Amino acid sequence: MKTLEILFWLALFIIFYSYLGYGILLYAIIKTRRALGLSKPYSENEDYEPEVTLFVAAYNEKDYVDEKVKNSFSLNYPKEKVKHVWVTDGSDDGTPDLLRKYAGVEVYHLDERGGKIGAMNRGMQFVKTPIVIFSDGNTNLGEDSIREMVNLFRNPKVGCVSGEKRIYSKDADAAAGAGEGLYWKYESTLKKWDAELYSVVGAAGELFAIRTELWQEVEKDTLLDDFIISLRVAMSGHTIQYNPNAYAIETASANVKEELKRKVRISAGGIQSVVRLYPLLNIFRYGTLSFQYISHRVLRWTLTPLLLLLIIPVNLILAVNSGMEISNIYTLLFFGQVLFYIMALTGWFLENRKIKVKILFVPYYFFIMNLSVFLGFKRYIKGNQSVKWERAKRG
């Protein structure tokens, strides 16, 4: 029984650390560094305005082209210093023809569809500027996004800059919108602290930039292109920085079914990334970057979901062994788990009946996130997650 107790508390600690403990530790470290004067911003250079390429790999984005191009041309950066490159491999809905109507937009199209990473690999040969900014075709960028990202490249140590993903929020948001919005707000805070400590652990594909010279062609079966590209930049000795003032905004998934579809393919890509970036697990080689990577990403994609499943029967055994006395810590924790999953189940029940109780969306979304890891792992093992992703429907 002593072994079970040790297993239970160790599992509970890892779960807590994965989702909240790392954030608390990170905050404490950052506060200490600030107090000691170790967190100093890089000196500014008002004249730093290099040429950039705004790169969009698009597949059948006809409904978003006009708004996206209009948004891209309206960004606050010298117009003559922004090159607009769209790669539209496989698009058969008229997207390339629509884009060609706009002067100043370079369109590179192939009829064959090779997935987003195939389009990125092919399209990078047309990028001649020192900085390339990747963005999705269905997102709009904040007015100062380019300038805010470019400013961080004044530091030669910075090899990649991640913008912020924002979700349009409405009072009537369903579980997908409410849960996704809260999740990204929390992730945004962690990214700010990660960047201040050393480096962000991966960039958001909706908006990120790299020094063009650091581009490495990515394996054609890569599922999380943004994650692999940015982490390999970090592994080269540069850092990934984060600027929430540079942001891409989009609507949330239309419902939890669509959000689960998106999360499963991300989870499959996460497992693939952990395998593909295995050298980054060596903390003796990569130091702080490895610590951040394992704490912020690896645990969530591997060990933590398994432990969430394991602690239920272990907790039950310990509670029964204590006589299920309500004053016993194991009994309280077991019924706490039961209550949490009842709330998640109730959130699912009400979601299907269009009844919105936001307090239930957090446990429901948390459950969906971890369920997606198991489904993603199964898909990765079977090898049936295509790089030609089916886009989740948006609200």
Image: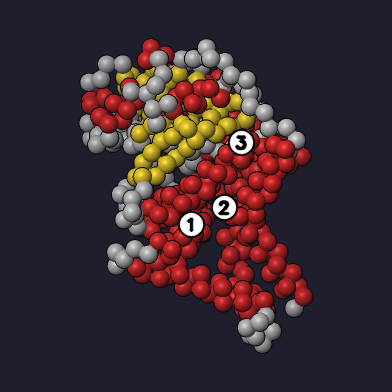
Q: Earlier in the sequence, mark 2 or mark 1?
A: 2
Quick check: 203 above or below 348? above
Which percent across, then down, holds residue 75?
Answer: 37, 23
Residue depicted at 57% across the width and 39% down the height: 192
Q: Residue furthest front?
A: 35
Indicate the amino acid at tag 2.
Trp
- Which residue in the protein does label 1 denote? 369
* Mark 2 neighbour class, 10 Å CA radius: few under 14, some 14 to 19, many 20 or more: many
Residue tagged 2: 301
Circles 3, 2 touching at the beta carbon (< 8 Å): no
Q: Which is more N-terminal, label 1 or label 3?
A: 3
Which residue lies at the image location 34% right of the left edge and 63% below the top edge?
356
Name which residue type carries label 1: Met
Residue bearing mark 3: 195
In front of the other: 280 or 177 = 177
Q: Nearer the viewer, residue 373 or 89?
A: 373
The CA span between labels 3 and 2 is 21 Å
Side (left or right) of 244 relative to 260? right
Nearer to me, 1 or 50: 50
Task: Report crowding for label 3: few under 14, some 14 to 19, many 20 or more residues within 10 A (C-alpha).
Answer: some
* Number of numbered labels in the structure image: 3
Quadrant of the rendering where the N terminus is positioned: bottom right
* Residue for point 59% across, 55% down: 19
At label 3, which amino acid type do we have?
Ala
**Considering the numbered disc 2 on the image, is that residue within a helix, a strand or a loop?**
helix
Residue 342 % position (x, y): 46, 73
